[in-house]
Image: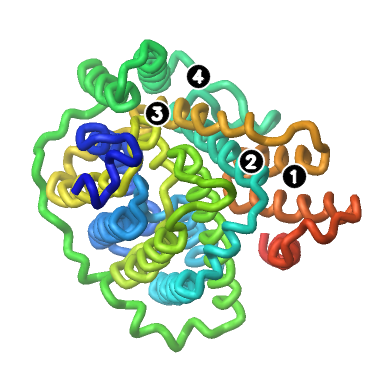
Amino acid sequence: MRNFFKFTERNTSFKQETLAGVTTFLSIAYILVVNPLILSQAGMDSGAVFTATALTAIIGTLLIGLLANYPIGIAPSMGLNSFFTFSVCIGMGIQWQVALTGVFIAGIIFMILSVLKIREKIINIIPLNLKYAIASGIGFFITFIGLKNGGVIISNPDTFVSIGNLSSPTTLLAILGLVITIVMLVRGINGGIFYGMIITTVIGMIVGLINVPSKIIGSIPSIEPTFGVVFSHLDQVFTPELLAVIFTFLIVAFFDTAGALIALTSQAGMMKGNTVPNIGRALLADSTASAVGAILGTSTPATSVESSAGIAVGGRTGFTAVVIAACFTIALFFSPILSVITLEVTAPALIIVGALMAMEIRKIDWTKLEIVIPSFLTIIMMPLTSSVAIGLAFGFILYPLCLVAQKRYKEIHPIMYVLCLLFILYFAFIV
């Protein structure tokens, strides 16, 4: 096992990888609760979605761990499940069965693009400074999510966001967890993020802010209501309206995953020069999970940015992913325990992990305006729009534009021009 996952080469251990896997699982376990809540509003059976969510995470995470040796988890995407429910099913009036078939077709297209190494080619031609900007931007985005989940910042009609009610008990719990985690990290305690989450959970239960589970073991809901429905609706997706939806799933999922993989492999120290080792296998795992997830009954899965929590603890190999998958498997039987993993518990981890990822910002060449402008807007637009893909879009449009303005046409890869045009069309006709 040590040789297969290259423990020595990546300077890690069984204990370190296990701790990282459990930490990542705790950071993304909320998806088992939230995904059924969101998709059930589209008319889907929440119990079936719970099981489909767990099985998709298990399969996708195992694939990326075993095929690519990445310490990363794959799970249904929060942004895309909201798009699926509120934009496609409710907003456009499309039945969830048909929309799910659209997700399946997008997943098949992803698999073809991955096998042909087109996705790999696109990721590897992204300029190095933009890759650092993507990693940094996702860091700011993750911290923004953590602050929002903890109630530290809230929406405001006058200023868009403002400080939350810091006297709120749940917000105080998140702040206390943040302080505890920071203290352990700056004192050099390995696994400080993980221990911070555990301590915060215990304190929350003691003071009555987190419900103590009434039971530990629960039955696994049947997947029958959603399993395989995509195969009976293939003839209903080839309409202009739904083809546009499939294209949107492709664009957003493609670049959300690309951005996440760049950021996470950079954080783990796996990026070599301007290339990401085994990226083709990772993309194949991700795209396979998309197709399988649709068959099981969930919206598009993606590389989870919360994997950064496990990487921060020391996850460096695919064994971390195996541990994450094992935790999702256990969660199928111990679903009542998931109620203790609240947003306030995970908020401190996300805030701190975001800060760690934002350290990549120092590698950007801040002396050249043609790099500064696209890099900065790539970074800032991710948290401001709550979208990795839109942040990438600004960078992919402005980077070629800046170099063309300097008559440096030959320094831009032809694919970058194509991506620039695609994102302009994306803004013009979809966003």
Select label 2 or label 4 by which is in front: 2
Residue 183 lies, in percent from the top left, at 38, 12
Look at label 4 and name its amino acid: Asn
Residue 345's place in the image compared with 217, above or below, is above
Q: Nearer the viewer, mark 2 or mark 3?
A: 2
Can the viewer see residue 169 in this picture? no
Q: Earlier in the sequence, mark 2 or mark 1?
A: 2
Q: Earlier in the sequence, mark 3 or mark 1?
A: 3
Other-residue count near label 3 (Cα within 10 Å), few / some / many at <14 / 14–19 / ≥20: many
Instruction: Measuring from the top left, give residue 256's x and y in whole percent.
Output: 53, 54
Q: CA distance from mark 2 to mark 4?
A: 32 Å
Location of residue 408 (image quadrant): bottom right
| Mark 3 / mark 4, whichever is N-terminal | 4
If you read the primary sequence from the N terminus, does the residue marked by circle 4 or circle 1 appear first? 4
Distance between the Cα atoms at labels 4 and 1?
35 Å
| Residue 172 vs residue 275, the one in the foreground | 275
- Residue 67 located left or right of residue 283: left
Figure coloring = rainbow
The reply to whether callout 2 and callout 1 are in contact (CB within 8 Å) is: yes
* Precedes in sequence: disc 2 or disc 3: 2
* Residue topped by disc 4: 165
Residue at 61 percent across and 40 percent down: it is 132
Q: Is residue 105 left or right of residue 31?
A: right
Amino acid at the residue labelled 3: Ala
Q: Please determine whether, in this image, residue 278 is positioned above or below residue 195.
A: below
Q: Residue under label 3, please give it.
A: 349
Image coordinates of residue 392 in percent, x first then y, are: 64, 51
The numbered mark at residue 133 is: 2
